[in-house]
Amino acid sequence: MNTVVHSLNNSLNLARLNNIRKCASTAKSIRQPRRWTKVSIGALAILGAGGTAYYYSIENQERRKMKVLVGGVGRFLRSLYIGMSLSIDYKWTLYGLVGDEYDKAAKPVHTRAAQRILEGCLKNGGLYIKLGQGLVSFNHMLPKEYIDVLVVLQDKALPRKSDEVRQLFLEDFKMLPEEMFQSFESEAISAASIAQVHKAVTHEGQEVAVKVQYIDLQDRFHGDIKTVDILLYLIGLMHEKFDFSWVLKDLAHTLESELDFENEGRNGEKCARDLKHLDYLYVPTIHWNKTSKRVLTAEWIDGIKISDLDGIKKMGLSIKDINHKLCKCFADQIFHSGFVHADPHPGNVYVRKSEQSGKAELVLLDHGLYDYLKPNQRKSLCQLYKAIVLKDEANMVKYSNELGVKESDSLIFCEIIVLRPINPATVGVHGAMTSLEEKYVQTMAMKHFDKIMDVIKAVPRSMLLLIRNLNTIRAISRIHGHPVDRHYIMGKSAIDGLYKDENRTSFLDKIKSIWSRWVFDYKLQRESFQLWAQRRLLRVLIYFGFVPNFEKLESKYEQQMVERMA
């Protein structure tokens, strides 16, 4: 019996020992990953502390480059997310819809898309805002919802902190802004795509506008260009018709030159010399001793934006006079010198009342983005514009070809230049576009998008920014209600430009110019008189009941014209 009990006790003790070993083994296996977790956390903490110590041990400029690198990844992902959201929203919401049902459903989608783009542009800043401003200038082709939302990009961006401004002054001038100026307002009065503007007073007592570039912009420029290039490439893969990566590659150098504020100052001075014959045009004086590649100091200008219709009326100025001067000064830039301001949106064109004449004076700001037409390109463009206004089809083909466009695409190119339909049956490009003509332009943009892209690819690269200039001026004229015939103004300037040398104009050239303008005016006035006489005759016939209602007849004729041209 004792033997049995002893045997059982041994068995129980052995079982307990095995259980203890198992528990110990289990506890060890549990402690093992916990130990590794502690080691991992410790390693991460050491790396984090080491990285932080390294970050604060390097120079400010090197820190900024590290921030730019990390921020570039964020901007790319944000842009990619917005692009995918737009694509999915359009496809999901509008799938299978046609006609009026499609148009009705598309409006809120356009608004959502524009709001997403606006948010992305403001958060990403820099180049993205510049691209957004480019979209706004195409207000005759984009849906109204886009323009209503994105218009704030013309003079809005996210202002930076004052310590960034102080750091930039230390890097460029080895002194703080408070030392360089008698007074310097640390809060920016405006913020745009690449810089913000501060008001200051020099030690001589002169009020100045100090344009300060965002401190990290030059560091991030090439990365942002590459990011946008990749996004455009991806869009091109998904939607072949919307491959615009070639545009960015061609304009990258021009956009980069906009970051050089010393170059901007020189551009402004050349603009003032080129347009010195226009006494109503003013370019602010540059303070070169307070200017660097990232800081531009110019005289302070009191004025209002050219799009501020209420402000213009309160000043007692004529919108018609202002619009005429606007069209004239940019026409002379294009056709006389070929040195063209490529970003004349309303935030860059101010209006003030002249102390001498009491009439409107235009002030041109922001001369960073310019392009230059070669003399032979400028003269071909002069001839082309003259041919367009006179509806000279043979010369429209000839001079389009001189600018790189094949014969079959010459009409499309001419319509891109004047930004409206061309009816070969009449002389002149009269008045503002009708609603039917605007619909025609939008229809052409959709139906013949491939051809339009082929034409734009064919022309000299300087023409891309020139087209932007023309479109922006047309957009401002639209805000003004098209009070003048800008095509007529530009046509006369083009004729003068045919006989202008960049350095001199001979007496014989002036005589030729006067004669050509007289012939030009005669043809247009003759056409206008014929149109007037035809309308009067029709009204008489309507009064006696010989023809249907004139307005209905005209509307039907315009509809048939647009349908035939489309």
Image (spheres, grey):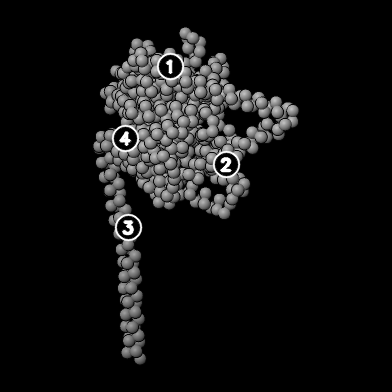
Look at label 3 and name its amino acid: Thr
Can residue 191 be spotted in the picture? no
Tag 2 secondary structure: helix
Decide: marks 2, 3 in contact (CB < 8 A)? Answer: no
Packing grade of label 3 (10 A; few <14, some 14-19, many >=20) is: few
Q: Which residue is mark 2?
A: 563
In the drawing, what numbered circle is on residue 253?
Answer: 4
Asked if residue 3 is positioned above or below residue 165 in the image, the reply reads below
Of the two numbered discs 2 and 1 on the same chain, state the one appearing first in sequence. 1
Q: Which residue is mark 3?
A: 37
Q: Which residue is mark 1?
A: 514
Decide: marks 3, 4 in contact (CB < 8 A)? Answer: no
Look at label 1 and name its amino acid: Ile
- Alpha carbon separation for disc pair 2 and 3: 73 Å
Q: Residue at x 28, y 48 (%)?
A: 47
Of the two numbered discs 2 and 4 on the same chain, state the one appearing first in sequence. 4
- Residue 269 is situated, as x and y percent measured from the top left of the image, at 34, 19
Q: Point out the image quarter for the N terminus.
A: bottom left
The image quadrant of residue 492 is: top left
